Image (cartoon, helix red, strand yellow):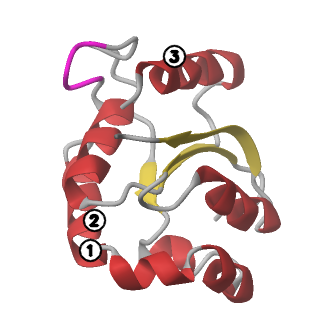
Amino acid sequence: MFNGKKVIAIGERDGIASPAIAACVQAAGAEVILSATECFV
Amino acid sequence: MDLRTQEAILRAVERHGKEHLIVLLGSPSPESAEIAAATVVHGDPTYAGPLAEVQLGLPVFHILEDQIREALDPRLYEEQVGIMETVLDKAGIVLALQRVRAQLQ
C-alpha cells in the first residue's frame, strides 16, 4: 500500500504525532513529503 | 486545521502532484479527524485558510484504521502508535474518515 507512495503526515499532539506516523510509513516504503504536528491549546 | 499546515499541504501538492499521494492523520478525536479529512478533500470548512474552496480530493486515512495498520510493520506500529490506539475513540475516528471518503464518490 505504501511502497512508492508519497505521504503527507498530519499528526496532533494529543493524538498521534507526525514523527510516529512518518516512522511507520517510511519503513513500509513511502516517502514522507510533509510532516506536521498540530497543537490546539 | 492550522493555517500554516494548510499552506504547507497546498505547496506540497503543487510541488509533487496528487498522483501516488496519501494523507495520513493522527487526530485525537472523531471531530478533529473529520475536520482535518474534510479539509484535504473538500477544502477548509471554516473558510479561513489557504485551502478554503480548494477541493484537493486527496485520499485520506487515519493511522488507526485497520487497512493502514495492516500495511505497516507490526512491531514498529506497536512501538509508535500502540498506546494511543488503546485510549482514543478508534471506532468513532474510523466512522468519521469513512463519512468523508464516502462524499468523494
Horizontally, residue B52 falls left or right of residue A5, namely left
Q: Which residue in the structure is indicated by mark 2? A: B93
Would you say the magenta stretch is mainly helix, strand or loop?
A: loop
Q: Nearer the viewer, residue B67 or A35?
A: A35
Q: Are marks 2 and 3 on the same chain?
A: yes
Q: Who's the residue at 64% across and 42% down the image?
A: B20
Q: Which residue in the structure is indicated by mark 3? A: B7
> Dividing the image into 4 quarters, which one contains the N terminus of chain A?
bottom right
Q: CA distance from mark 1 to mark 2?
A: 6 Å
Q: Which residue in the structure is indicated by mark 1? A: B89
Q: Who's the residue at 75% across and 54% down the image?
A: A30
Highlighted magenta segment, given as a residue range: B44-48
Figure check: A6 above or below B89: above
Which element is circle 1 on? Answer: loop
Q: Who's the residue at 44% across and 37% down the image?
A: B58
How many other residues sit within 10 Å of disc 2, few (<14), some (14-19) or many (≥20)? Answer: many
Q: Quarter-wise, where is residue B16 in the image?
A: top right
How many other residues sit within 10 Å of disc 1, few (<14), some (14-19) or many (≥20)? Answer: some
Q: Nearer the viewer, residue B40 or B3?
A: B3
Marks 1/2 in contact by CB < 8 Å: the verdict is yes
Q: Name the residue type under label 2.
A: Ile
Identify the chain of the residue marked 1, using the numbered disc in the image.
Answer: B
Identify the chain of the residue marked 2, using the numbered disc in the image.
Answer: B
Q: CA distance from mark 1 to mark 3?
A: 28 Å
Q: Are marks 1 and 3 on the same chain?
A: yes
Q: Quarter-wise, where is residue B18 in the image?
A: top right
Circle 1 or circle 2, nearest the eye: 1
- Residue B84, horizontal then vertical, whole percent: 46, 76
Q: Earlier in the sequence, mark 2 or mark 3?
A: 3
